[in-house]
Amino acid sequence: MAKHIGILTAGGDSPGLNAAIRGVGKASTGYYGMNVIGFRDGFRGLMENRTVRLDSSVLSGILTIGGTILGTSRDKPHRMPVGDKTLDMTDVLVANYQKHNLDALVCLGGGGTAKNAYRLMQHGLNVITLPKTIDNDVACTDTTFGFDTALIIATEAIDRLHSTAHSHHRIIVLEVMGHNAGWLALAAGIAGGADVVLIPEIPYDVNKVADAILQRSRGGKGFSIVCVSEGAMPKEEAESLRAAQEAKAAAKKSKNGKKAEAAAETIAELESEQASSTVRLTRQLEQLTRLESRVTILGHVQRGGTPSAADRLLATRLGTACADLIDQGVFGVMVAARGEGHEPVPLEQVAGHRKVVPLDHPWIESARHLGTNLGD
Ligand code: F6P
């Protein structure tokens, strides 16, 4: 009997998603003779039963296209906005999975998607995930598809900013994405030769950053490029955030709802302040150094467009490996990238964990040896 599988893409989109859909789809249908359907817009499509048959005509010609042909959303099965309410719709998703006689559900996504897939696994679904995100922050995998393309875009941005910063003798601060992990900023900062790189893993002292820029200026370098991760924070704010997160966890543990709520409010305030922190940092640097400064926020440009060759290759090989695992009946795993190969990792090891940059990572060492200022 031919197996039936469903595929969905969830969370923020990322280059390489279509290459992965094609990899899973072509190997499952062409090589293994399975039937494959796609659900539109992430877990919402599974809830609303919005499907598309992924046959060879749909899977053809999508390798190089950015985004996802299936559409995506950040909806969670257990907290789904329905009308003006937010409901636990897990049972509906499970019923729809059964209605389609699925043998497996492939979820393409990052850490949040792994968590949601794990929950569905606990409700009896045969799930399998592939790690995508430009942030590279999924636990238990060497890397994620989308990261390489975003790195190329962010590096090119630094290259382009160099010439204009140099011409105008300015500080230019570039904010790149990465959520709460500094992989993208650190890698692009090194590859693009930024003078300062600020990442969430190393809370920064703005005075030390200004001193490093002034030292460059005294040495005859009248411009500086600062590459800052969107999650980077000054030391004091990072300390307050850590304290609030600890207070929230403790209050939750002791079931003190009011304290947990207060801590959650503090966290939300700090996070909303952080939304404008790169602009604030740029102003502070201008004041402290008296050098004209500009800010560039790269934003969703990093997530758009055609995937790099490396991302196409990674997404394709993880996609075809996923079809192999389905054929073998291996479920409840993420297909992790491991060296040139792959490895199925149990979802319970992935869900709820985040891969941040270890402080002794070789990239950090390399940046320090170059004399790059890391804000500490
Ligand atoms: O997780 C990927 C990511 O691009 C992060 O780098 C960023 O913080 C976030 O998504 C942006 O999300 P949205 O698409 O909701 O603006």
Image (cartoon, grey):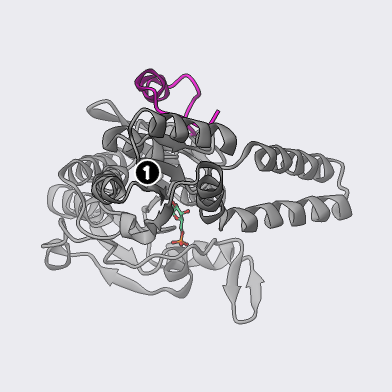
Q: Secondary structure at mark 1?
A: strand
- The relative height of residue 304 versus residue 168 in the rendered view (above or below) is below
Q: Amino acid at mark 1?
A: Pro
Q: Is residue 331 visible?
A: no
Residue 334 occupies quadrant: top left
Q: Position of residue 38 (x, y in %)?
A: 31, 64
- The relative height of residue 171 versus residue 90 in the rendered view (above or below) is above
Q: Is residue 283 visible?
A: yes
- The relative height of residue 376 versus residue 13 in the rendered view (above or below) is above
- According to the image, label 1 marks what residue? 131
Q: Residues within 10 Å of mark 1 (few under 14, many from 20)?
A: many
Q: Position of residue 107 (x, y in %)?
A: 39, 53
Point out the quarter of the image occupied by ligand 1: bottom left
Residue appearing at x 34%, y 68% in the figure:
71
Q: Is residue 327 left or right of residue 226?
A: left
Q: Nearer the viewer, residue 197 or 271?
A: 197
Quarter of the image with the C terminus in it: top right
Find out whether residue 152 is within the magenta segment: no
Question: Magenta segment, which residues?
Answer: 356-376
Q: Position of residue 99 (x, y in %)?
A: 42, 68
Q: Position of residue 338 (x, y in %)?
A: 31, 28
Q: Is residue 9 left or right of residue 83?
A: left
Residue appearing at x 19%, y 40% in the figure:
310
Q: Nearer the viewer, residue 363 or 166?
A: 166
Residue appearing at x 25%, y 55% in the figure:
21
Q: Is residue 243 left or right of residue 214?
A: right
- The relative height of residue 82 versus residue 181 in the rendered view (above or below) is below
Q: Nearer the viewer, residue 195 or 197?
A: 195
